[in-house]
Image: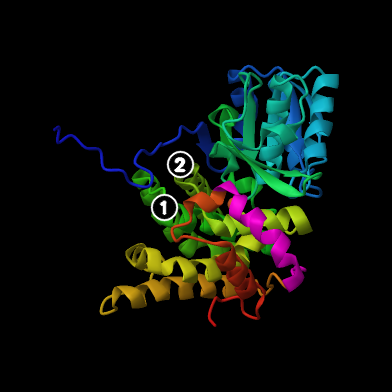
Amino acid sequence: MSSFNIASTEFPLRNFHATPRATIGWGAYRMAGEEAKAIGIKNALIVSSGLKGTGILDEVAGVLKAAGISVSIYAGVTSNPKDHEVHAAHKVFKQNRCDGVVSVGGGSSHDCAKAVRIVDAHDGQSIREFNGMCTTKKPITVPQLAITTTAGTGSETSWAAVITDTQKMYKMVIFDPNIISSRAIVDPALMRTMPPYLTAWTGMDAMTHAVEAYVSRLGVRTSQGLGLHAIKMISRGLRDAYANPTNAEARENMAWAQYTAGHAFNSAGLGIVHSMAHTLGALFDSPHGQCNAIGLVPVERYNMVACPDKFRDIAEAMGVDTRGMTTWKAAEAAVDELEKLRADLGITETFATLGLKEEHLEKFTPVVMQDVCTLGNPRVVTPDVVKMIFRHCMAPGANGKS
Ligand SMILES: [Fe+2]
C-alpha cells in the first residue's frame, strides 16, 4: 500500500494575482496621456462620478487631449454603482466609437468602467449576468487606465468589480482576472480635494481591506506582509489626512497605503465586514467606507478567537506596546485600537442610524451569507452569527461588546 498522501486542508492551493503597472506619486496624473497611448487608447471614454467642484475631470481630459487622444465623458456614476449606469456609460462608449476607458475617481468609477469593458466584450449583454468568480466568456479587449482620487478603494489594482443589481437588489461581486485595469495612476495630488468625512470613510475602507486580507482564512502569505504594512501606514497617516487635508506627507502615506491594501486583498480576499457593507450598500445605498468603518470593530471582535496571534501582530502594527501582554490581551488591544481610530475620525453612526432595523435581518442575512467575501472570514459564520453581528453594529457604540 502506498504511503503517498496529500493532506487535505481547507484551501490547499493559493493564488497570488497579477496587478497592473501603477505610476504613483505627486503629479502622476500628468502621465495619463502617455499611459493611455501606451495601452492603445486613441478615443477615450472617461468614466466618473463627475467629481464636481474639484476641476479634476477637466485636468485629466486636458492631459489626454494634449497627448492627441479624443475624449468623451460619462459622469453619471454614483456610489454603489448601479447596473443601469454601466449600460448608460456603455451607450456613450458605443455612440462615440471609443476604444478605451479612463476611469477617474474611487472604486465606483473604476468598477463601473470594468463593467463597461465586460458588457462591450459580450455584445451588450446585461451586466447582471456576470456575478461571481470568472464569469466572463470572451476576451476583454478594451483597455482601461484607472486614475484613483480617493485613498480607499484599491480597485485600480484589483481583479474585482462590485456592481448593484437593481432588479434583485444585491451587490454583485465580480472577481475575474480578465477585468483588471491595464494601467493605474495613484496621485496624492488628486486626493487633497476629499472632504474630511470622505477621507475618514475611504481610509477606513482601506484599513478594512488590510485587516480582512491579513486575517483571511485564504491565508495568502505574500498578502499578509502587504496587509500588515498597510495597517501600519494607515495607523500613522489617516488621522493626519483627516484632520488636515493639505498635509502632504499624510496624503502620500494614505495613497500608498490604500494601494498596498488593494494588493493585499486582491489575492487574500476579504471577510464579512465587506459582505455586510455590500448588503447595506445595495439595499440602502449606504456609503461603502462608512459601512466598513462601523462593521470592522464588531466583526473583528468576533473573529479574534480564530487567530489571536494575527491580531497581536495588528496591535503591534498599530503602535501598541504589547510587551508583557498575553496574546489574548494584545489581540483585544488591536480591536480596541481600531475602535479608537474610528472614534478619532468622528465616525459615530451605527447601522441603526443608517436605517437598519430588526425586521430587516431575516432578509439581509442570506445576502451576507451568499456574498463571495464571506469565504475569507477567518471564523466560521452562520446565519445566527450574522444576525448577532448586525445587532452589534446597530447598538450604540457599535463596538461588539455585550
Ligand atoms: Fe472595500
Q: Give the CA distance from mark 1 to mark 2.
A: 12 Å
Mark 1 and mark 2 residues within 8 Å of each other at the beta carbon: no
Residue behind mark 1: 217
Magenta stretch, residue numbers: 354-372
User: Residue at 59% across / 75% down in the picture?
Assistant: 343
Residue 356 sits above or below residue 58 on the image: below
Asked which secondary structure carries label 2, the reply is: helix
User: Residue at 63% across / 30% down in the picture?
Assistant: 145
Q: How many marks?
A: 2
Q: Position of residue 238 (x, y in %)?
A: 54, 62
- On the picture, is 272 further left or further right than 46? left
Kindly report the secondary structure that dominates the magenta region of the rendered protein.
helix
Residue behind mark 2: 267
Does the magenta segment cover residue 188? no
Q: Residues within 10 Å of mark 2 (few under 14, many from 20)?
A: many
Place residue 97 in its image quadrant.
top right
- Mark 1 residue type: Arg
Q: Position of residue 189 (x, y in %)?
A: 62, 47
Q: Position of residue 250 (x, y in %)?
A: 53, 58
Look at discs 1 and 2 and give the one toward the viewer. 1
In the rendered image, is residue 306 in sight? yes
Quadrant location of the N terminus in the rendered image: top left
Q: Residues within 10 Å of mark 1 (few under 14, many from 20)?
A: many
In the rendered image, is residue 194 in sight? no
